[in-house]
Amino acid sequence: MTASAGRPRPADVPKGAHTVERLQGYLARMELALGSIMMIAMVLLVFWAALSRYVAVPINWSVDAAQGLFVWVVYLGASQALRRRRHIGVGIVMENVPQRFRLMVRLALYVLMVLFLAMVIRNAILVSMVNSGRQFPSFALSYSWVTISVAVGGALILITIVVNI
Protein backbone atom coordinates (compact mmCIF):
# COMPACT_ATOMS: atom_id res chain seq x y z
CA MET A 1 0.00 0.00 0.00
CA THR A 2 1.12 3.50 -0.66
CA ALA A 3 1.17 5.59 2.44
CA SER A 4 -0.04 8.76 0.74
CA ALA A 5 -2.87 7.35 -1.36
CA GLY A 6 -4.15 4.73 1.09
CA ARG A 7 -4.85 2.26 -1.70
CA PRO A 8 -2.93 -0.83 -2.76
CA ARG A 9 -0.40 -0.40 -5.55
CA PRO A 10 -0.28 -3.27 -8.06
CA ALA A 11 3.10 -4.98 -8.30
CA ASP A 12 3.51 -4.06 -11.98
CA VAL A 13 3.10 -0.29 -11.37
CA PRO A 14 6.52 1.29 -10.79
CA LYS A 15 7.08 3.25 -7.60
CA GLY A 16 6.36 6.93 -8.27
CA ALA A 17 3.98 6.24 -11.17
CA HIS A 18 1.08 7.79 -9.28
CA THR A 19 3.15 10.94 -8.74
CA VAL A 20 3.83 11.13 -12.48
CA GLU A 21 0.11 10.67 -13.19
CA ARG A 22 -0.74 13.47 -10.77
CA LEU A 23 1.87 15.73 -12.39
CA GLN A 24 0.43 14.95 -15.83
CA GLY A 25 -3.07 15.72 -14.58
CA TYR A 26 -1.92 19.01 -13.08
CA LEU A 27 -0.10 20.00 -16.29
CA ALA A 28 -3.14 19.09 -18.39
CA ARG A 29 -5.46 21.19 -16.21
CA MET A 30 -3.00 24.10 -16.18
CA GLU A 31 -2.59 24.00 -19.97
CA LEU A 32 -6.33 23.84 -20.51
CA ALA A 33 -7.06 26.68 -18.08
CA LEU A 34 -4.31 28.97 -19.41
CA GLY A 35 -5.10 28.15 -23.02
CA SER A 36 -8.80 28.79 -22.46
CA ILE A 37 -8.21 32.09 -20.68
CA MET A 38 -5.80 33.21 -23.39
CA MET A 39 -8.18 32.19 -26.17
CA ILE A 40 -11.08 34.06 -24.57
CA ALA A 41 -8.86 37.11 -24.01
CA MET A 42 -7.70 36.96 -27.62
CA VAL A 43 -11.25 36.78 -29.01
CA LEU A 44 -12.47 39.59 -26.76
CA LEU A 45 -9.46 41.71 -27.64
CA VAL A 46 -9.93 41.28 -31.38
CA PHE A 47 -13.66 41.97 -31.05
CA TRP A 48 -13.01 45.07 -28.95
CA ALA A 49 -10.36 46.28 -31.41
CA ALA A 50 -12.71 45.81 -34.37
CA LEU A 51 -15.49 47.62 -32.55
CA SER A 52 -13.21 50.50 -31.57
CA ARG A 53 -11.87 50.76 -35.12
CA TYR A 54 -15.47 50.97 -36.35
CA VAL A 55 -16.13 53.98 -34.10
CA ALA A 56 -12.82 55.57 -35.25
CA VAL A 57 -10.95 55.04 -31.97
CA PRO A 58 -8.47 52.28 -32.86
CA ILE A 59 -6.56 50.38 -30.20
CA ASN A 60 -3.05 50.20 -31.61
CA TRP A 61 -1.68 47.58 -29.24
CA SER A 62 -4.51 45.07 -29.75
CA VAL A 63 -2.98 43.36 -32.78
CA ASP A 64 0.35 42.81 -31.02
CA ALA A 65 -1.36 41.48 -27.91
CA ALA A 66 -3.65 39.17 -29.90
CA GLN A 67 -0.71 37.77 -31.89
CA GLY A 68 1.24 37.13 -28.70
CA LEU A 69 -1.72 35.34 -27.12
CA PHE A 70 -2.22 33.32 -30.31
CA VAL A 71 1.33 31.93 -30.19
CA TRP A 72 0.82 30.80 -26.58
CA VAL A 73 -2.55 29.22 -27.42
CA VAL A 74 -1.00 27.30 -30.33
CA TYR A 75 1.72 25.70 -28.19
CA LEU A 76 -0.53 24.96 -25.21
CA GLY A 77 -3.05 23.42 -27.62
CA ALA A 78 -0.38 21.32 -29.34
CA SER A 79 0.62 19.89 -25.98
CA GLN A 80 -3.00 19.10 -25.12
CA ALA A 81 -3.55 17.46 -28.49
CA LEU A 82 -0.55 15.18 -28.12
CA ARG A 83 -1.48 14.29 -24.54
CA ARG A 84 -4.93 13.22 -25.73
CA ARG A 85 -3.41 11.46 -28.77
CA ARG A 86 -5.40 13.79 -31.02
CA HIS A 87 -2.40 15.21 -32.85
CA ILE A 88 -3.38 14.88 -36.50
CA GLY A 89 0.04 13.86 -37.86
CA VAL A 90 0.51 11.07 -35.34
CA GLY A 91 -3.06 9.85 -35.81
CA ILE A 92 -2.79 9.62 -39.60
CA VAL A 93 0.51 7.75 -39.43
CA MET A 94 -0.69 5.31 -36.80
CA GLU A 95 -3.96 4.53 -38.60
CA ASN A 96 -2.03 3.38 -41.67
CA VAL A 97 0.43 1.12 -39.83
CA PRO A 98 -0.43 -2.56 -39.32
CA GLN A 99 -1.30 -3.39 -35.71
CA ARG A 100 1.78 -5.55 -35.09
CA PHE A 101 4.14 -2.68 -36.01
CA ARG A 102 2.37 0.15 -34.19
CA LEU A 103 4.39 -0.04 -30.98
CA MET A 104 7.68 0.05 -32.89
CA VAL A 105 6.52 2.93 -35.09
CA ARG A 106 5.16 4.85 -32.09
CA LEU A 107 8.50 4.50 -30.27
CA ALA A 108 10.41 5.60 -33.38
CA LEU A 109 8.14 8.63 -33.74
CA TYR A 110 8.62 9.50 -30.08
CA VAL A 111 12.42 9.30 -30.41
CA LEU A 112 12.33 11.57 -33.47
CA MET A 113 10.01 13.98 -31.67
CA VAL A 114 12.28 14.09 -28.60
CA LEU A 115 15.31 14.90 -30.76
CA PHE A 116 13.39 17.55 -32.69
CA LEU A 117 11.93 19.10 -29.53
CA ALA A 118 15.34 19.24 -27.86
CA MET A 119 16.59 21.35 -30.78
CA VAL A 120 13.45 23.49 -30.81
CA ILE A 121 13.62 24.16 -27.06
CA ARG A 122 17.31 25.01 -27.19
CA ASN A 123 16.88 27.40 -30.12
CA ALA A 124 13.72 28.94 -28.68
CA ILE A 125 15.58 29.79 -25.48
CA LEU A 126 18.38 31.36 -27.51
CA VAL A 127 15.91 33.39 -29.60
CA SER A 128 14.11 34.46 -26.45
CA MET A 129 17.36 35.66 -24.92
CA VAL A 130 18.18 37.60 -28.10
CA ASN A 131 14.68 39.13 -28.08
CA SER A 132 14.84 40.14 -24.43
CA GLY A 133 15.80 43.69 -25.40
CA ARG A 134 13.21 43.94 -28.16
CA GLN A 135 9.86 45.39 -27.20
CA PHE A 136 6.50 45.42 -28.89
CA PRO A 137 6.14 48.66 -30.83
CA SER A 138 2.79 49.53 -29.27
CA PHE A 139 3.40 48.73 -25.58
CA ALA A 140 6.32 48.21 -23.23
CA LEU A 141 6.59 44.42 -23.05
CA SER A 142 9.57 42.35 -24.10
CA TYR A 143 9.03 40.22 -27.18
CA SER A 144 10.76 37.38 -25.36
CA TRP A 145 7.43 36.74 -23.55
CA VAL A 146 6.10 35.54 -26.90
CA THR A 147 9.17 33.68 -28.12
CA ILE A 148 9.57 31.79 -24.83
CA SER A 149 6.17 30.18 -25.52
CA VAL A 150 7.91 27.95 -28.08
CA ALA A 151 10.30 26.63 -25.41
CA VAL A 152 7.55 26.25 -22.79
CA GLY A 153 5.23 24.48 -25.23
CA GLY A 154 8.07 22.28 -26.44
CA ALA A 155 8.95 21.35 -22.86
CA LEU A 156 5.32 20.46 -22.09
CA ILE A 157 5.16 18.30 -25.22
CA LEU A 158 8.48 16.68 -24.28
CA ILE A 159 7.13 15.81 -20.82
CA THR A 160 4.08 14.23 -22.43
CA ILE A 161 6.23 12.15 -24.78
CA VAL A 162 8.56 10.95 -22.02
CA VAL A 163 5.59 9.92 -19.86
CA ASN A 164 3.96 8.10 -22.82
CA ILE A 165 7.12 6.14 -23.61
Image (cartoon, rainbow, N blue to C red):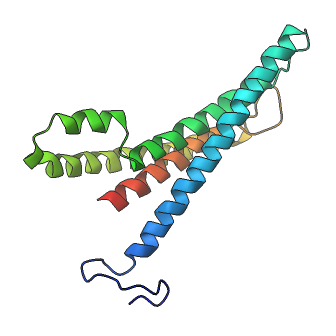
Number of labelled discs?
0
Q: Is 145 left, or right, of 163 in this rendering? A: right
Judging depth in this view, the residue of 40 and 105 nearest the camera is: 40
Residue 102: image x %, image y %?
A: 15, 47
Residue 14: image x %, image y %?
A: 31, 78
At a point 33% along the width and 58% down the height, the residue shown is 164
Instruction: Answer whether residue 144 is visible to the viewer in this image.
Output: no
Where does the N terminus fall, quadrant-wise?
A: bottom left
Where does the C terminus fall, quadrant-wise?
A: bottom left
Instruction: Tell me the quarter of the picture where residue 66 sits.
Output: top right
Residue 44: image x %, image y %?
A: 75, 28
Residue extending furthest toward the front? 7
User: Is residue 110 positioned above or below 38 on the image?
Assistant: below
Residue 123: image x %, image y %?
A: 49, 43
At a point 51% along the width and 40% down the height, the residue shown is 77
User: Is residue 148 positioned above or below 6 on the image?
Assistant: above
At a point 37% along the width and 40% down the height, the residue shown is 86
Q: Is 3 left, or right, of 48 in this rendering? A: left
At a point 66% along the width and 28% down the height, the residue shown is 67
Q: Is 61 left, or right, of 109 in this rendering? A: right
Instruction: Answer whether residue 91 is visible to the viewer in this image.
Output: yes
Instruction: Tell me the quarter of the picture where residue 81 sits.
Output: top left
Judging depth in this view, the residue of 147 and 57 nearest the camera is: 57
Instruction: Tell me the quarter of the picture where residue 113 sits.
Output: top left
